Image: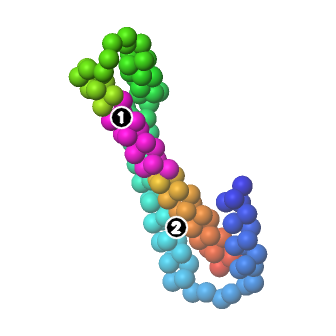
Amino acid sequence: MYRILVFIQTLLKFSSHVKCSPADIQGIQSKISTLTRQIADCDGRLQSAMSQPCVSSKTEQDIKNLYDVVRNRRWGRDSTETSTMAKILNLEISRDEMNQTIRQIKTEKADLENKLLEEQANLQRLKK
């Protein structure tokens, strides 16, 4: 929805007819091509990040199972429990870091898509 609004605003902002040279059009087409490649790169990085084991549902289940192991023990804290808690902490840190990376990539991709829409609108305006 936001992208559509940006696209419409861009069209309205540049609705007046402006003379341009073929070099102007070629420059915009080059920007569009570059943005398209950058978006494809973001998609690849996003797929890679989302396929990491630390963001899978199996990891969530592993964390839950480890918490259950610690909770169900009847004896006091020992080295096994400390090691189990360390595993939980490492899993949670890995998961949180990867989720942050995924959010950053998604934000970067959205920004690139908005720029792409603006450049496409500029190209359409100049071709009229």
Point out which mark residue 32 bears.
2
Q: Nearer the viewer, residue 58 or 35?
A: 58
Q: Vertical placement of 79 versus 111: above or below? A: above
7 to the left or right of 65: right
Please state which amino acid type lies under the numbered disc 2: Ile
Q: Vertical placement of 64 versus 4: above or below? A: above
Instruction: Assign a secondary structure to mark 2.
Output: helix
Specify the segment rendered in magenta. Answer: 88-103
Residue at 76% in and 75% down: 12
Estimate the x, y position of residue 44 in percent, counting from the top left: 42, 47
Q: Nearer the viewer, residue 14 or 23?
A: 14
Please state which amino acid type lies under the numbered disc 1: Leu
User: Tag 2: Cα neighbours inside 10 Å, few (<14), some, or many (≥20)?
Assistant: some
**Residue under circle 1?**
89
Position of the N terminus, as image quadrant, is bottom right
Estimate the x, y position of residue 74 in percent, counting from the top left: 37, 11
Q: Nearer the viewer, residue 34 or 20?
A: 34
Instruction: Assign a secondary structure to mark 1.
Output: helix
Estimate the x, y position of residue 86 in percent, counting from the top left: 30, 31
Q: Nearer the viewer, residue 51 or 44?
A: 51
Estimate the x, y position of residue 76 in percent, counting from the top left: 32, 17
Disc with the residue nearer the chain's start (1 vs 2): 2
Position of the C terminus, as image quadrant, is bottom right
Is 60 magenta? The answer is no
Q: Quadrant of residue 14?
A: bottom right
Q: Vertical placement of 53 versus 108: above or below? A: above
91 to the left or right of 8: left
Q: Is residue 127 among the parts visible in the rendering?
A: no
